[in-house]
Image (tube, rainbow, N blue to C red):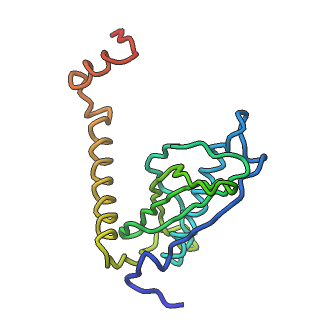
Amino acid sequence: MTKRLYKHAKESQVTITELMLPSHSNFSGKIHGGHILNLMDQIAFACASKHSQQYCVTASVNRVDFLNPIEVGELLTLKASVNYTGTTSMVVGLRVESENVRTGEVKHCNSSYFTMVAKDENGNNVKVPGLILDTKEAIRRFSRSIKRQEQAKHRSTEFHSSEFKIENHIDLVKSKNAKVEL
């Protein structure tokens, strides 16, 4: 199979649906978050590998908020799509929904963004095909990923120990449930 310079996101989109079993539940009888994260990582891998035609590894996960509990017996559907391509990395957008098979009710359980990096057989980073942005939604998702990366860079710089300025944060810390003893 020949490698292309650019691909449409729809060419690598992946959807999986799985029945949630009692073995997936935690002590409160809800589906364990770790099981959901494992499924999310698997579908992000599948989507990124399909886009890049390479083995991919997870470099980072941007925020996972569990919005609604998932019950044993529900169908869990995970959808993945490449939202952004860098030189060797891709941001895969994920959406997780559960469906009650008796009522047909569908709940949005979480959304997240996994940064995946393409690797060759020796473990070296490999260039990935770019994205063809052919809709307003595709441009919005690509732009949002760029902004998210810029914000993360700013956060990591601002809070790096050599750059951190306590005077910029002490009042905020004191206003929360913490006791400062300097």
Quadrant position of the N terminus in the picture: bottom right
At horizontal 70% and vertical 55% (from top left) the residue drawn is 102
At horizontal 55% and vertical 43% (from top left) the residue drawn is 68
Q: Could you tell me residue 74's position as x and y percent?
A: 68, 53
Q: Residue furthest top?
A: 181
Quadrant position of the C terminus in the picture: top left
At horizontal 36% and vertical 70% (from top left) the residue drawn is 87
Compare residues 104 and 163 and report the one nearer the observer: 104
Please, is residue 76 above or below residue 23 in the view?
below
Q: Could you tell me residue 110's position as x and y percent?
A: 50, 50
Q: Could you tell me residue 25's position as x and y percent?
A: 72, 43
Where, by quadrant of the figure, is residue 140 drawn?
bottom left
> How many numbered circles are shown?
0
Q: Residue furthest left?
A: 167
Q: Residue furthest right?
A: 23
| 28 relative position to 55: left or right | right
At horizontal 51% and vertical 72% (from top left) the residue drawn is 13
Q: Could you tell me residue 99's position as x and y percent?
A: 62, 56
Compare residues 53 and 71 and report the one nearer the observer: 71
Q: Residue furthest front?
A: 103
Please, is residue 148 above or below residue 167 in the view?
below
| 69 relative position to 167: left or right | right
Where, by quadrant of the figure, is residue 56 drawn?
bottom right
| 167 relative position to 86: left or right | left
| 7 relative position to 136: left or right | right
